[in-house]
Amino acid sequence: MAQQEAGYSTGARIRQRRMDLGMRQGVLAQRAGISASYLNLIEHNRRRIAGKLLVDIAAVLSIDPSQLSEDTQSALLNELRNGAVESIAEIDRVGDFASRFPGWAQHLTHSQKRVTELERTVEILSDRLTHDPHLSDALHEVLTVVTAIRSSSGILAGGGNLDAVWQERFQKNIDEDARRLAESAESLVQYLDGAGRPDQGISSAGEEIDACFARHSWHFEALEQPDTPASDVQDIAQEIVRDSKDLRSDGTRARMMRHLLEYRIRAVQMPLGAFLQAAAECNWDPLALASRFRQPIAEVMHRLAMLPATSPAGGIGLVGCDGAGNLTFRKAPEGFSVPRFDGACALWPLFEALARPDSMLVHDVSQSQGRGSEDVPRFTALSCGVQTLPEKLGAPVLRQAYMLLIPQGLAEGSDTAPPFIDAGASCRICLQAACPARREAAILSRQKTEVAF
Amino acid sequence: MAKTVLLIEDEPNIVEAIRFLLARDGWRVETHGRGDTAMDAVAKHRPDLIVLDVMLPKRSGFDILRDLRAAEDTRHLPVMMLTARGQSKDREMAEQYGVSRFMTKPFSNTEMLDAVRELAEA
Protein backbone atom coordinates (compact mmCIF):
# COMPACT_ATOMS: atom_id res chain seq x y z
CA MET A 1 0.00 0.00 0.00
CA ALA A 2 2.78 2.37 0.93
CA GLN A 3 4.22 2.00 -2.53
CA GLN A 4 0.87 2.62 -4.15
CA GLU A 5 0.34 5.64 -2.00
CA ALA A 6 3.67 7.11 -2.93
CA GLY A 7 2.14 9.84 -5.05
CA TYR A 8 0.22 11.07 -2.04
CA SER A 9 2.79 10.77 0.65
CA THR A 10 4.53 13.54 2.47
CA GLY A 11 7.82 11.73 2.05
CA ALA A 12 7.52 11.61 -1.72
CA ARG A 13 6.68 15.27 -1.84
CA ILE A 14 9.65 16.21 0.30
CA ARG A 15 11.90 14.16 -1.97
CA GLN A 16 10.41 15.67 -5.11
CA ARG A 17 10.69 19.20 -3.85
CA ARG A 18 14.27 18.65 -2.69
CA MET A 19 15.26 17.25 -6.08
CA ASP A 20 13.49 20.08 -7.87
CA LEU A 21 15.68 22.47 -5.88
CA GLY A 22 18.74 20.37 -6.69
CA MET A 23 19.45 19.96 -2.97
CA ARG A 24 21.30 16.90 -1.69
CA GLN A 25 19.72 14.75 0.99
CA GLY A 26 22.59 15.46 3.35
CA VAL A 27 22.19 19.22 3.01
CA LEU A 28 18.48 19.16 3.73
CA ALA A 29 19.01 16.82 6.69
CA GLN A 30 21.69 19.02 8.16
CA ARG A 31 19.69 22.22 7.81
CA ALA A 32 16.63 20.57 9.31
CA GLY A 33 18.72 19.22 12.17
CA ILE A 34 18.26 15.50 11.52
CA SER A 35 20.50 12.74 10.24
CA ALA A 36 20.63 11.96 6.55
CA SER A 37 19.58 8.38 7.18
CA TYR A 38 16.51 9.55 9.12
CA LEU A 39 15.58 11.88 6.28
CA ASN A 40 16.01 8.97 3.91
CA LEU A 41 13.50 6.97 5.95
CA ILE A 42 11.07 9.88 5.87
CA GLU A 43 11.42 10.33 2.16
CA HIS A 44 10.65 6.66 1.63
CA ASN A 45 7.68 6.74 3.94
CA ARG A 46 9.28 4.54 6.56
CA ARG A 47 8.87 7.20 9.22
CA ARG A 48 5.88 9.44 9.79
CA ILE A 49 6.57 13.12 9.83
CA ALA A 50 4.47 15.94 11.25
CA GLY A 51 4.63 18.90 13.58
CA LYS A 52 7.77 20.93 14.08
CA LEU A 53 10.03 18.78 11.91
CA LEU A 54 7.63 19.13 8.98
CA VAL A 55 7.59 22.88 9.48
CA ASP A 56 11.40 22.98 9.62
CA ILE A 57 11.84 20.91 6.49
CA ALA A 58 9.23 23.00 4.68
CA ALA A 59 11.14 26.13 5.69
CA VAL A 60 14.40 24.74 4.30
CA LEU A 61 12.57 23.80 1.10
CA SER A 62 10.91 27.28 0.98
CA ILE A 63 7.45 25.79 0.70
CA ASP A 64 4.31 26.03 2.80
CA PRO A 65 4.11 23.03 5.17
CA SER A 66 0.50 22.46 4.15
CA GLN A 67 1.69 21.73 0.65
CA LEU A 68 3.77 18.88 1.98
CA SER A 69 1.23 17.48 4.41
CA GLU A 70 -1.15 14.86 3.26
CA ASP A 71 -4.59 16.03 4.28
CA THR A 72 -4.45 19.17 2.24
CA GLN A 73 -2.90 17.23 -0.52
CA SER A 74 -5.59 14.58 -0.66
CA ALA A 75 -8.26 17.28 -0.54
CA LEU A 76 -6.49 19.00 -3.41
CA LEU A 77 -6.28 15.75 -5.36
CA ASN A 78 -9.98 15.17 -4.83
CA GLU A 79 -10.73 18.62 -6.15
CA LEU A 80 -8.52 18.07 -9.15
CA ARG A 81 -10.17 14.76 -9.96
CA ASN A 82 -13.59 16.22 -9.41
CA GLY A 83 -12.93 18.91 -11.96
CA ALA A 84 -11.17 16.68 -14.43
CA VAL A 85 -13.02 14.95 -17.21
CA GLU A 86 -12.52 11.36 -18.23
CA SER A 87 -10.86 12.41 -21.42
CA ILE A 88 -7.72 13.70 -19.76
CA ALA A 89 -5.20 11.02 -20.59
CA GLU A 90 -2.84 12.01 -17.83
CA ILE A 91 -5.37 11.79 -15.05
CA ASP A 92 -3.45 8.95 -13.44
CA ARG A 93 -0.60 11.38 -12.91
CA VAL A 94 -2.69 13.77 -10.86
CA GLY A 95 -0.69 13.00 -7.71
CA ASP A 96 2.54 13.71 -9.52
CA PHE A 97 1.13 16.97 -10.86
CA ALA A 98 -0.12 18.15 -7.48
CA SER A 99 3.14 17.43 -5.68
CA ARG A 100 5.36 19.00 -8.27
CA PHE A 101 3.29 22.08 -9.01
CA PRO A 102 1.25 22.70 -5.87
CA GLY A 103 0.63 26.33 -6.75
CA TRP A 104 -0.58 25.55 -10.23
CA ALA A 105 -2.71 22.71 -8.90
CA GLN A 106 -4.33 25.09 -6.41
CA HIS A 107 -4.90 27.60 -9.13
CA LEU A 108 -6.45 24.94 -11.34
CA THR A 109 -8.88 23.83 -8.66
CA HIS A 110 -9.90 27.45 -8.06
CA SER A 111 -10.51 27.90 -11.77
CA GLN A 112 -12.50 24.70 -11.89
CA LYS A 113 -14.71 25.83 -9.06
CA ARG A 114 -15.21 29.17 -10.71
CA VAL A 115 -16.09 27.53 -14.03
CA THR A 116 -18.68 25.33 -12.34
CA GLU A 117 -20.20 28.35 -10.65
CA LEU A 118 -20.24 30.33 -13.88
CA GLU A 119 -21.74 27.48 -15.85
CA ARG A 120 -24.59 27.34 -13.40
CA THR A 121 -25.05 31.09 -13.64
CA VAL A 122 -25.16 30.96 -17.42
CA GLU A 123 -27.63 28.12 -17.36
CA ILE A 124 -29.93 29.94 -15.00
CA LEU A 125 -29.63 33.25 -16.83
CA SER A 126 -30.30 31.76 -20.24
CA ASP A 127 -33.21 29.87 -18.80
CA ARG A 128 -34.45 33.12 -17.37
CA LEU A 129 -34.07 34.98 -20.66
CA THR A 130 -36.09 32.34 -22.44
CA HIS A 131 -38.77 31.78 -19.88
CA ASP A 132 -38.94 34.84 -17.73
CA PRO A 133 -42.26 36.51 -18.50
CA HIS A 134 -41.28 39.72 -16.76
CA LEU A 135 -38.14 40.23 -18.80
CA SER A 136 -39.85 39.38 -22.04
CA ASP A 137 -42.72 41.79 -21.23
CA ALA A 138 -40.29 44.55 -20.37
CA LEU A 139 -38.36 44.09 -23.60
CA HIS A 140 -41.57 43.97 -25.58
CA GLU A 141 -42.69 47.22 -24.04
CA VAL A 142 -39.40 48.92 -24.88
CA LEU A 143 -39.43 47.70 -28.48
CA THR A 144 -43.06 48.71 -28.94
CA VAL A 145 -42.45 52.24 -27.79
CA VAL A 146 -39.27 52.51 -29.83
CA THR A 147 -41.23 51.40 -32.89
CA ALA A 148 -43.85 54.09 -32.33
CA ILE A 149 -41.19 56.75 -31.83
CA ARG A 150 -39.24 55.64 -34.87
CA SER A 151 -42.31 55.75 -37.11
CA SER A 152 -43.59 59.07 -35.81
CA SER A 153 -40.20 60.76 -35.97
CA GLY A 154 -39.66 59.32 -39.44
CA ILE A 155 -42.84 61.00 -40.55
CA LEU A 156 -41.79 64.31 -39.00
CA ALA A 157 -38.29 64.14 -40.42
CA GLY A 158 -39.59 63.12 -43.82
CA GLY A 159 -40.28 66.80 -44.54
CA GLY A 160 -42.61 67.55 -47.40
CA ASN A 161 -45.93 69.18 -46.90
CA LEU A 162 -46.94 67.80 -43.53
CA ASP A 163 -49.68 70.07 -42.29
CA ALA A 164 -49.57 71.70 -38.89
CA VAL A 165 -52.28 69.53 -37.35
CA TRP A 166 -50.46 66.29 -38.18
CA GLN A 167 -47.15 67.80 -37.15
CA GLU A 168 -48.49 68.71 -33.75
CA ARG A 169 -50.12 65.33 -33.39
CA PHE A 170 -46.95 63.34 -34.06
CA GLN A 171 -44.89 65.65 -31.88
CA LYS A 172 -47.30 65.00 -29.05
CA ASN A 173 -47.13 61.25 -29.67
CA ILE A 174 -43.34 61.28 -29.65
CA ASP A 175 -43.27 63.24 -26.44
CA GLU A 176 -45.69 60.78 -24.85
CA ASP A 177 -43.74 57.76 -26.07
CA ALA A 178 -40.42 59.23 -25.01
CA ARG A 179 -41.68 59.51 -21.44
CA ARG A 180 -42.99 55.99 -21.57
CA LEU A 181 -39.69 54.75 -22.94
CA ALA A 182 -37.77 56.40 -20.15
CA GLU A 183 -39.95 54.66 -17.60
CA SER A 184 -39.79 51.23 -19.18
CA ALA A 185 -36.05 51.50 -19.72
CA GLU A 186 -35.61 52.39 -16.10
CA SER A 187 -37.69 49.49 -14.90
CA LEU A 188 -35.78 47.17 -17.19
CA VAL A 189 -32.47 48.37 -15.83
CA GLN A 190 -33.72 47.92 -12.29
CA TYR A 191 -34.83 44.44 -13.12
CA LEU A 192 -31.54 43.50 -14.75
CA ASP A 193 -29.67 45.01 -11.85
CA GLY A 194 -31.63 42.78 -9.54
CA ALA A 195 -30.82 39.82 -11.74
CA GLY A 196 -27.14 40.44 -11.17
CA ARG A 197 -27.70 40.12 -7.45
CA PRO A 198 -29.85 37.14 -7.85
CA ASP A 199 -32.93 37.10 -5.70
CA GLN A 200 -34.03 34.25 -7.83
CA GLY A 201 -31.46 31.69 -6.94
CA ILE A 202 -28.28 31.88 -8.95
CA SER A 203 -26.29 30.51 -6.08
CA SER A 204 -28.29 28.43 -3.72
CA ALA A 205 -29.34 30.01 -0.45
CA GLY A 206 -27.51 27.27 1.40
CA GLU A 207 -24.18 28.13 -0.20
CA GLU A 208 -24.52 31.80 0.62
CA ILE A 209 -25.28 31.01 4.22
CA ASP A 210 -22.40 28.53 4.44
CA ALA A 211 -20.09 31.19 3.04
CA CYS A 212 -21.29 33.69 5.62
CA PHE A 213 -20.79 31.24 8.49
CA ALA A 214 -17.38 30.26 7.18
CA ARG A 215 -16.29 33.88 6.94
CA HIS A 216 -16.99 34.20 10.66
CA SER A 217 -15.37 30.83 11.41
CA TRP A 218 -18.80 29.68 12.59
CA HIS A 219 -18.56 31.75 15.73
CA PHE A 220 -20.01 35.16 16.54
CA GLU A 221 -18.28 36.76 19.44
CA ALA A 222 -20.59 39.77 19.29
CA LEU A 223 -23.52 37.53 20.18
CA GLU A 224 -21.81 35.89 23.14
CA GLN A 225 -22.15 38.62 25.79
CA PRO A 226 -24.84 37.40 28.20
CA ASP A 227 -25.98 40.83 29.36
CA THR A 228 -26.64 42.38 25.94
CA PRO A 229 -30.25 43.64 25.93
CA ALA A 230 -32.57 41.95 23.42
CA SER A 231 -33.00 45.08 21.30
CA ASP A 232 -29.24 45.42 20.90
CA VAL A 233 -28.98 41.76 19.94
CA GLN A 234 -31.34 42.44 17.07
CA ASP A 235 -29.16 45.34 15.93
CA ILE A 236 -25.94 43.34 16.22
CA ALA A 237 -27.39 40.47 14.21
CA GLN A 238 -28.70 42.86 11.60
CA GLU A 239 -25.29 44.46 11.31
CA ILE A 240 -23.62 41.08 10.77
CA VAL A 241 -26.14 40.27 8.06
CA ARG A 242 -25.78 43.68 6.44
CA ASP A 243 -21.99 43.41 6.35
CA SER A 244 -22.07 39.96 4.75
CA LYS A 245 -21.48 40.30 1.05
CA ASP A 246 -22.03 36.56 0.73
CA LEU A 247 -25.74 37.03 1.33
CA ARG A 248 -27.14 38.28 -1.92
CA SER A 249 -30.89 38.15 -1.54
CA ASP A 250 -33.50 39.24 0.94
CA GLY A 251 -34.46 35.61 1.40
CA THR A 252 -31.00 34.49 2.49
CA ARG A 253 -30.53 37.59 4.63
CA ALA A 254 -33.73 36.73 6.47
CA ARG A 255 -32.61 33.13 6.89
CA MET A 256 -29.20 34.18 8.19
CA MET A 257 -30.96 36.51 10.61
CA ARG A 258 -32.93 33.55 11.98
CA HIS A 259 -29.73 31.52 12.27
CA LEU A 260 -28.11 34.33 14.25
CA LEU A 261 -31.05 34.72 16.61
CA GLU A 262 -31.04 30.97 17.21
CA TYR A 263 -27.31 31.23 17.84
CA ARG A 264 -27.98 33.96 20.37
CA ILE A 265 -30.50 31.80 22.22
CA ARG A 266 -27.92 29.03 22.45
CA ALA A 267 -25.30 31.50 23.63
CA VAL A 268 -27.63 32.59 26.44
CA GLN A 269 -28.77 29.10 27.41
CA MET A 270 -25.25 27.65 27.23
CA PRO A 271 -22.87 30.51 28.13
CA LEU A 272 -19.49 30.12 26.47
CA GLY A 273 -17.20 29.83 29.50
CA ALA A 274 -19.43 27.46 31.43
CA PHE A 275 -20.16 25.41 28.33
CA LEU A 276 -16.50 24.96 27.37
CA GLN A 277 -15.68 23.85 30.89
CA ALA A 278 -18.65 21.51 31.08
CA ALA A 279 -17.90 20.10 27.62
CA ALA A 280 -14.36 19.18 28.65
CA GLU A 281 -15.68 17.66 31.90
CA CYS A 282 -18.29 15.65 30.00
CA ASN A 283 -15.68 14.48 27.47
CA TRP A 284 -17.55 16.32 24.67
CA ASP A 285 -20.59 14.12 25.15
CA PRO A 286 -23.59 16.04 23.75
CA LEU A 287 -26.09 13.94 25.69
CA ALA A 288 -24.44 14.73 28.99
CA LEU A 289 -24.33 18.42 28.04
CA ALA A 290 -27.98 18.36 26.99
CA SER A 291 -28.97 17.07 30.38
CA ARG A 292 -26.65 19.41 32.25
CA PHE A 293 -27.91 22.53 30.44
CA ARG A 294 -31.44 21.19 29.94
CA GLN A 295 -31.31 21.92 26.23
CA PRO A 296 -32.58 20.00 23.20
CA ILE A 297 -29.90 17.73 21.76
CA ALA A 298 -29.87 19.48 18.36
CA GLU A 299 -29.11 22.80 20.06
CA VAL A 300 -26.24 21.28 22.03
CA MET A 301 -24.79 19.78 18.84
CA HIS A 302 -24.93 23.17 17.14
CA ARG A 303 -23.31 24.82 20.11
CA LEU A 304 -20.49 22.27 20.11
CA ALA A 305 -19.82 22.93 16.44
CA MET A 306 -19.80 26.70 16.79
CA LEU A 307 -17.28 27.28 19.55
CA PRO A 308 -14.37 29.66 18.96
CA ALA A 309 -12.04 28.37 16.26
CA THR A 310 -9.13 28.88 18.63
CA SER A 311 -10.60 26.72 21.40
CA PRO A 312 -9.77 23.01 21.47
CA ALA A 313 -13.27 22.39 20.12
CA GLY A 314 -12.74 24.62 17.07
CA GLY A 315 -12.13 21.59 14.89
CA ILE A 316 -15.52 19.99 15.54
CA GLY A 317 -17.67 19.67 12.44
CA LEU A 318 -21.41 19.39 12.05
CA VAL A 319 -23.49 18.24 9.13
CA GLY A 320 -27.25 18.48 9.11
CA CYS A 321 -29.83 17.16 6.69
CA ASP A 322 -33.56 17.29 6.21
CA GLY A 323 -35.88 14.34 5.84
CA ALA A 324 -35.15 14.14 2.12
CA GLY A 325 -31.43 13.85 2.79
CA ASN A 326 -30.61 17.33 1.53
CA LEU A 327 -27.73 18.85 3.45
CA THR A 328 -28.95 21.81 5.43
CA PHE A 329 -25.91 22.53 7.57
CA ARG A 330 -22.37 22.09 6.39
CA LYS A 331 -19.51 22.75 8.72
CA ALA A 332 -16.85 20.44 7.35
CA PRO A 333 -14.01 19.72 9.77
CA GLU A 334 -10.47 19.62 8.45
CA GLY A 335 -9.97 16.30 6.70
CA PHE A 336 -13.63 15.51 6.05
CA SER A 337 -15.15 16.91 2.91
CA VAL A 338 -18.81 17.74 2.54
CA PRO A 339 -20.07 18.10 -1.04
CA ARG A 340 -21.62 21.37 -2.10
CA PHE A 341 -23.51 20.36 -5.22
CA ASP A 342 -23.59 16.58 -5.41
CA GLY A 343 -25.49 14.41 -3.00
CA ALA A 344 -23.51 13.25 0.01
CA CYS A 345 -22.15 9.76 0.61
CA ALA A 346 -25.01 7.49 1.62
CA LEU A 347 -22.75 5.65 4.05
CA TRP A 348 -22.65 8.59 6.43
CA PRO A 349 -24.27 7.59 9.71
CA LEU A 350 -26.17 10.89 9.41
CA PHE A 351 -28.66 9.17 7.16
CA GLU A 352 -29.04 6.17 9.43
CA ALA A 353 -29.95 8.64 12.15
CA LEU A 354 -32.87 9.91 10.05
CA ALA A 355 -34.38 6.46 10.28
CA ARG A 356 -33.65 6.09 13.98
CA PRO A 357 -34.73 9.35 15.55
CA ASP A 358 -34.14 10.14 19.18
CA SER A 359 -31.16 7.92 19.64
CA MET A 360 -27.50 8.82 19.47
CA LEU A 361 -25.47 6.73 17.07
CA VAL A 362 -21.75 6.51 17.65
CA HIS A 363 -19.34 5.67 14.83
CA ASP A 364 -15.73 5.93 14.00
CA VAL A 365 -15.59 7.41 10.49
CA SER A 366 -13.01 8.43 7.95
CA GLN A 367 -13.09 9.29 4.29
CA SER A 368 -10.30 7.00 3.21
CA GLN A 369 -12.62 5.66 0.50
CA GLY A 370 -11.38 2.12 0.87
CA ARG A 371 -7.73 3.07 0.62
CA GLY A 372 -7.40 2.28 4.29
CA SER A 373 -4.52 4.68 4.63
CA GLU A 374 -3.70 5.44 8.22
CA ASP A 375 -2.97 9.03 7.35
CA VAL A 376 -6.60 9.88 6.64
CA PRO A 377 -8.07 11.66 9.64
CA ARG A 378 -10.66 9.83 11.69
CA PHE A 379 -13.59 11.27 13.54
CA THR A 380 -15.99 10.17 16.17
CA ALA A 381 -19.32 10.72 14.48
CA LEU A 382 -22.26 11.28 16.82
CA SER A 383 -25.47 11.21 14.84
CA CYS A 384 -28.94 11.98 16.02
CA GLY A 385 -32.27 12.28 14.27
CA VAL A 386 -34.85 14.73 15.58
CA GLN A 387 -38.45 15.43 14.72
CA THR A 388 -40.13 18.78 14.93
CA LEU A 389 -43.62 18.38 16.27
CA PRO A 390 -46.25 19.71 13.87
CA GLU A 391 -47.49 23.25 14.45
CA LYS A 392 -51.02 21.91 14.67
CA LEU A 393 -52.97 18.72 14.12
CA GLY A 394 -52.69 17.54 10.55
CA ALA A 395 -49.55 19.56 9.80
CA PRO A 396 -46.54 17.57 8.59
CA VAL A 397 -43.90 16.20 10.95
CA LEU A 398 -40.49 17.48 9.89
CA ARG A 399 -37.42 15.35 10.44
CA GLN A 400 -33.84 16.43 10.61
CA ALA A 401 -30.66 14.62 11.45
CA TYR A 402 -27.35 15.98 12.64
CA MET A 403 -23.93 14.41 12.68
CA LEU A 404 -21.28 15.86 14.92
CA LEU A 405 -17.76 15.10 13.76
CA ILE A 406 -15.31 15.17 16.64
CA PRO A 407 -11.68 14.89 15.56
CA GLN A 408 -10.07 11.85 17.11
CA GLY A 409 -7.89 12.82 19.98
CA LEU A 410 -10.16 15.55 21.31
CA ALA A 411 -12.32 13.24 23.40
CA GLU A 412 -11.00 10.35 25.39
CA GLY A 413 -11.80 7.03 23.78
CA SER A 414 -14.28 4.70 25.40
CA ASP A 415 -13.59 1.10 26.33
CA THR A 416 -15.75 -0.30 23.56
CA ALA A 417 -14.66 0.70 20.07
CA PRO A 418 -17.54 2.09 18.01
CA PRO A 419 -18.23 0.55 14.59
CA PHE A 420 -15.92 1.88 11.88
CA ILE A 421 -17.34 3.34 8.70
CA ASP A 422 -15.05 4.01 5.80
CA ALA A 423 -17.06 6.57 3.88
CA GLY A 424 -16.52 9.01 1.06
CA ALA A 425 -17.73 12.51 0.29
CA SER A 426 -19.76 11.99 -2.84
CA CYS A 427 -19.86 9.21 -5.45
CA ARG A 428 -18.35 11.17 -8.30
CA ILE A 429 -15.03 11.61 -6.58
CA CYS A 430 -15.00 8.46 -4.48
CA LEU A 431 -12.43 5.74 -5.04
CA GLN A 432 -14.21 3.04 -3.03
CA ALA A 433 -14.25 0.07 -5.40
CA ALA A 434 -17.13 -2.12 -4.30
CA CYS A 435 -19.60 0.15 -2.59
CA PRO A 436 -23.17 -1.04 -2.16
CA ALA A 437 -24.33 2.57 -1.86
CA ARG A 438 -22.79 3.82 -5.09
CA ARG A 439 -25.20 5.96 -7.14
CA GLU A 440 -22.96 6.89 -10.02
CA ALA A 441 -19.60 5.94 -11.35
CA ALA A 442 -16.56 7.79 -10.15
CA ILE A 443 -14.66 9.86 -12.61
CA LEU A 444 -11.70 7.62 -11.99
CA SER A 445 -11.85 3.88 -11.88
CA ARG A 446 -10.22 2.11 -8.99
CA GLN A 447 -7.85 0.23 -11.30
CA LYS A 448 -6.49 3.38 -12.82
CA THR A 449 -5.87 4.87 -9.42
CA GLU A 450 -4.11 1.82 -8.14
CA VAL A 451 -1.67 2.00 -10.99
CA ALA A 452 -0.96 5.61 -10.17
CA PHE A 453 -0.70 5.47 -6.44
CA MET B 1 -60.44 52.45 -56.34
CA ALA B 2 -57.97 52.43 -53.44
CA LYS B 3 -57.01 49.10 -51.96
CA THR B 4 -57.86 48.43 -48.32
CA VAL B 5 -55.34 47.46 -45.66
CA LEU B 6 -56.53 46.26 -42.28
CA LEU B 7 -54.09 47.08 -39.49
CA ILE B 8 -54.61 44.88 -36.44
CA GLU B 9 -52.46 46.46 -33.74
CA ASP B 10 -53.17 47.63 -30.21
CA GLU B 11 -50.57 50.39 -29.78
CA PRO B 12 -52.41 53.64 -30.59
CA ASN B 13 -49.31 55.62 -31.55
CA ILE B 14 -48.03 52.91 -33.86
CA VAL B 15 -51.50 52.67 -35.37
CA GLU B 16 -51.55 56.40 -35.92
CA ALA B 17 -48.14 56.48 -37.59
CA ILE B 18 -48.77 53.51 -39.87
CA ARG B 19 -52.21 54.73 -40.74
CA PHE B 20 -50.77 58.09 -41.75
CA LEU B 21 -47.98 56.50 -43.83
CA LEU B 22 -50.19 54.08 -45.69
CA ALA B 23 -52.96 56.61 -46.25
CA ARG B 24 -50.44 59.02 -47.72
CA ASP B 25 -49.32 56.19 -49.96
CA GLY B 26 -52.84 55.85 -51.34
CA TRP B 27 -54.31 53.09 -49.17
CA ARG B 28 -57.62 53.02 -47.46
CA VAL B 29 -56.65 52.10 -43.91
CA GLU B 30 -58.92 50.34 -41.43
CA THR B 31 -57.72 49.59 -37.94
CA HIS B 32 -58.61 47.17 -35.20
CA GLY B 33 -57.06 46.94 -31.73
CA ARG B 34 -58.13 43.59 -30.26
CA GLY B 35 -57.37 39.95 -30.93
CA ASP B 36 -60.63 38.29 -30.03
CA THR B 37 -62.80 40.25 -32.49
CA ALA B 38 -60.19 40.55 -35.25
CA MET B 39 -61.86 37.94 -37.48
CA ASP B 40 -65.10 39.96 -37.36
CA ALA B 41 -63.19 43.04 -38.50
CA VAL B 42 -61.70 41.04 -41.38
CA ALA B 43 -65.18 39.91 -42.45
CA LYS B 44 -66.51 43.45 -42.17
CA HIS B 45 -63.76 45.31 -44.06
CA ARG B 46 -62.78 42.58 -46.56
CA PRO B 47 -59.22 43.97 -46.83
CA ASP B 48 -56.76 43.35 -49.66
CA LEU B 49 -53.94 43.02 -47.17
CA ILE B 50 -53.57 42.60 -43.42
CA VAL B 51 -50.86 43.95 -41.14
CA LEU B 52 -51.10 41.84 -38.01
CA ASP B 53 -49.35 42.34 -34.67
CA VAL B 54 -48.39 39.19 -32.77
CA MET B 55 -49.06 40.44 -29.25
CA LEU B 56 -52.68 41.49 -29.08
CA PRO B 57 -55.06 41.73 -26.19
CA LYS B 58 -57.35 38.73 -25.71
CA ARG B 59 -56.03 36.64 -28.59
CA SER B 60 -52.62 36.18 -30.18
CA GLY B 61 -51.78 37.09 -33.75
CA PHE B 62 -50.76 33.49 -34.38
CA ASP B 63 -54.26 32.25 -33.64
CA ILE B 64 -55.74 34.85 -35.96
CA LEU B 65 -53.30 33.87 -38.70
CA ARG B 66 -54.28 30.23 -38.32
CA ASP B 67 -57.96 31.13 -38.62
CA LEU B 68 -57.25 33.27 -41.68
CA ARG B 69 -55.42 30.39 -43.36
CA ALA B 70 -58.16 27.93 -42.46
CA ALA B 71 -60.98 30.00 -43.97
CA GLU B 72 -61.71 29.74 -47.67
CA ASP B 73 -62.04 33.51 -48.28
CA THR B 74 -58.79 34.51 -46.65
CA ARG B 75 -56.55 31.51 -47.40
CA HIS B 76 -54.45 33.47 -49.90
CA LEU B 77 -54.80 36.93 -48.41
CA PRO B 78 -51.37 38.60 -47.93
CA VAL B 79 -50.62 38.90 -44.24
CA MET B 80 -47.65 40.75 -42.81
CA MET B 81 -46.89 40.03 -39.16
CA LEU B 82 -45.32 42.48 -36.75
CA THR B 83 -43.52 41.33 -33.69
CA ALA B 84 -41.46 43.03 -31.07
CA ARG B 85 -39.55 39.90 -30.30
CA GLY B 86 -37.20 39.16 -33.13
CA GLN B 87 -36.97 35.61 -31.90
CA SER B 88 -36.51 32.87 -34.44
CA LYS B 89 -39.15 30.89 -32.57
CA ASP B 90 -41.84 33.46 -33.42
CA ARG B 91 -40.69 33.67 -36.99
CA GLU B 92 -40.74 29.90 -37.40
CA MET B 93 -44.20 29.67 -35.95
CA ALA B 94 -45.51 32.41 -38.22
CA GLU B 95 -43.98 30.74 -41.25
CA GLN B 96 -45.46 27.44 -40.28
CA TYR B 97 -48.89 29.04 -40.12
CA GLY B 98 -48.41 30.54 -43.56
CA VAL B 99 -47.45 34.15 -43.03
CA SER B 100 -46.66 36.11 -46.20
CA ARG B 101 -44.10 38.37 -44.67
CA PHE B 102 -42.54 39.04 -41.31
CA MET B 103 -41.44 42.39 -39.92
CA THR B 104 -39.58 42.95 -36.69
CA LYS B 105 -40.15 46.01 -34.54
CA PRO B 106 -38.70 48.57 -34.60
CA PHE B 107 -38.86 48.98 -38.38
CA SER B 108 -38.30 52.08 -40.48
CA ASN B 109 -41.14 53.73 -42.35
CA THR B 110 -39.48 52.94 -45.66
CA GLU B 111 -39.22 49.26 -44.78
CA MET B 112 -42.87 49.20 -43.88
CA LEU B 113 -43.97 50.98 -47.06
CA ASP B 114 -41.78 48.85 -49.32
CA ALA B 115 -43.02 45.65 -47.74
CA VAL B 116 -46.67 46.62 -48.11
CA ARG B 117 -46.18 47.67 -51.73
CA GLU B 118 -44.41 44.42 -52.59
CA LEU B 119 -47.08 42.35 -50.94
CA ALA B 120 -49.84 44.19 -52.77
CA GLU B 121 -48.14 43.65 -56.12
CA ALA B 122 -47.37 40.00 -55.59
Image (tube, coloured by chain):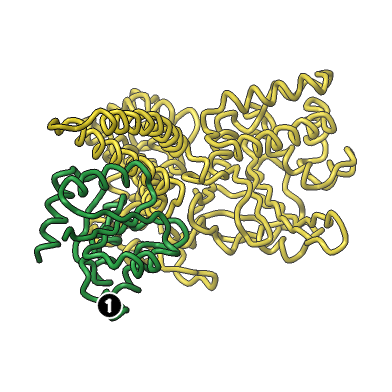
Residue A324: % across, % down: 64, 62
- In this view, which residue lies farthest toward the front? B1
Along the line of sight, the residue nearer the viewer: B104 or A345: B104
Q: Residue at x 29, y 36 (%)?
A: A149
Residue drawn at x 62%, y 37% as measured from the top left: A315
Which residue ends up furthest to the bottom in the rendered image?
Answer: B72
User: Label 1, on which residue?
Assistant: B73
Q: Residue A13: tell me if it is visible.
A: no
**Chain letter matching colour yellow:** A
Query: In the picture, which quadrant includes the N terminus of chain A?
Result: bottom left
In the depicted structure, whether residue A90 falls above or below residue A51: below
The subunit letter for the residue under badge 1 reads B
**Residue in the foreground of this view, choosing between A79 and A263:** A263
* Most foreground residue, A238 or B87: B87
Shown colour of chain B: green
Vertical order, B53 against B78 (above or below): above
Q: Is residue B46 above or below residue A152?
A: below
